[in-house]
Image (cartoon, rainbow, N blue to C red):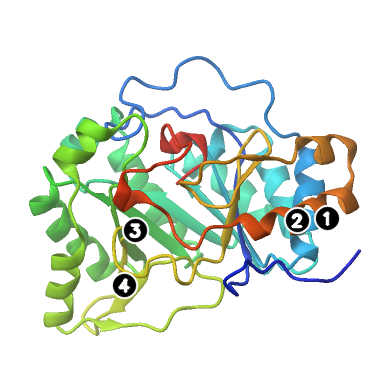
């Protein structure tokens, strides 16, 4: 197989694949699926063999990090097998999972044994009642116990994703700071993004991370160098805290300059940008196990990757809600 590396028209090496393995989600987050997931898991989710074909071609084309997402990825019963298949590909250096941590205490050992390197857990409030108000689940205390148990086991690559919502920020931000004071985790505040179904909610709740980031800098937090194959977060450390704080601010200037990622949905559609207007169907190649055909197709369509998203123009592309492709 040709050893060329995927590079977009703007010279950005595309070394990071976000792979959604299901649309299904068991939460009712107010900003994503306030009425819950409608229906059952789709029968056309990528099979394990299709995923193996996909990730083998991406790895040969320069992918070094794979993040498995959903929906809620842990609802796939074969997730440990998916993790093992992804991690087994030559060249894959980091295998990450994003999860809401439902039943993680039970499931984590199998994922770790399969080769999981990095874990991202969504916690949108550090108050149990507010957490329930946002997610529709009374799982806060179970999630915290899971995190503390995972850290105690020696697994140290844990990140917490916390959505910035205007209604709750006055409490969420100081609660989050207390959380990382004693725990060696990276907590990233994420700005709410507009999708096709959340315009009213977005207008009410969107909060820029700029002021919070400036306040941290004023308190002595130091910006860290960006790690290889990392996402777009800006991360800070402070000597008095065990953990670090990061910001993912898609509405900030130059957010897309270092974009290094591609996304594939649970049905095998590739998105060159989270908010792009075209989904490129990889399924014919995956169904046939056609690695060379897939490789050629990837290199032909990568020329269409845009320089930046168009969120400032209220153009959200095909994204109806974030459960479609994991954010």
Q: Is residue 115 visible?
A: no
Find numbered disc 3 in the image and state the secondary structure of the residue it sits on. Answer: loop
Find numbered disc 4 in the image and state the secondary structure of the residue it sits on. Answer: strand
Find numbered disc 2 in the image and state the secondary structure of the residue it sits on. Answer: helix
Q: Which residue is mark 1?
A: 296
Q: Are marks 1 and 2 in contact (CB under 8 Å)?
A: yes
Find numbered disc 1 in the image and state the secondary structure of the residue it sits on. Answer: helix
Judged left or right of residue 293, residue 131 is left
Marks 1/2: CA–CA distance:
6 Å
**147 or 322: nearer the eye?**
322
Q: Give the class, few, some or many, for how many residues have Cα within 10 Å of label 3's Cα (few <14, many ≥20).
A: many
Mark 2 or mark 4: which is in front? 2
Q: Is residue 268 above or below residue 162?
A: above
* Among numbered discs 1 and 3, the one appearing first in the sequence: 3
Q: Which mark is residue 300?
A: 2
Judged left or right of residue 116, residue 121 is left
Q: Give the class, few, some or many, for how many residues have Cα within 10 Å of label 1's Cα (few <14, many ≥20).
A: few
Q: Is residue 120 above or below residue 43?
A: below
* Among numbered discs 4 and 3, the one appearing first in the sequence: 4
* Among numbered discs 2 and 3, the one appearing first in the sequence: 3
Residue at (56, 66) in percent of width and height:
260
Residue at (75, 34) in percent of width and height:
47
């Amino acid at each position: 197989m040709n050893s060329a590396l995927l590079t977009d028209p703007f010279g950005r090496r595309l070394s990071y694949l976000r792979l959604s393995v299901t649309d299904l989600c068991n939460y009712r987050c107010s900003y994503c699926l306030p009425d819950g997931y409608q229906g059952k898991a789709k029968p056309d989710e990528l099979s394990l063999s299709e995923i193996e074909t996909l990730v083998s071609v991406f790895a040969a084309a320069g992918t070094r990090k794979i993040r498995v997402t959903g929906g809620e990825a842990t609802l796939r019963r074969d997730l440990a097998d998916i993790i093992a298949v992804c991690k087994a590909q030559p060249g894959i250096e980091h295998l990450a999972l994003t999860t809401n941590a439902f039943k993680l205490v039970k499931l984590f050992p199998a994922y770790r044994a399969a080769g999981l390197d990095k874990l991202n857990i969504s916690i949108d409030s550090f108050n149990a009642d507010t957490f329930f108000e946002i997610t529709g689940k009374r799982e806060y205390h179970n999630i915290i116990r899971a995190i503390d148990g995972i850290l105690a086991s020696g697994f140290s690559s844990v990140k917490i994703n916390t959505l910035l919502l205007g209604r709750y920020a006055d409490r969420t931000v100081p609660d989050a700071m207390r959380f990382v004071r004693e725990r060696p985790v990276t907590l990233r505040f994420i700005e709410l993004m507009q999708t096709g179904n959340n315009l009213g909610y977005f207008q009410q709740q969107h909060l820029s991370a700029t002021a919070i980031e400036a306040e941290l800098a004023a308190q002595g937090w130091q910006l860290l160098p960006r790690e290889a194959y990392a996402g777009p977060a800006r991360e800070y450390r402070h000597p008095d805290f065990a953990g670090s704080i990061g910001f993912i601010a898609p509405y900030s200037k130059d957010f897309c300059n270092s974009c290094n990622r591609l996304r594939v949905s649970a049905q095998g559609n590739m998105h060159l940008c989270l908010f792009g207007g075209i989904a490129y169907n990889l399924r014919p190649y995956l169904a046939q196990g056609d690695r060379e055909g897939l490789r050629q197709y990837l290199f032909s369509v990568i020329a269409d990757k845009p320089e930046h998203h168009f969120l400032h123009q209220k153009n959200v592309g095909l994204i109806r809600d974030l459960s479609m492709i994991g954010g």
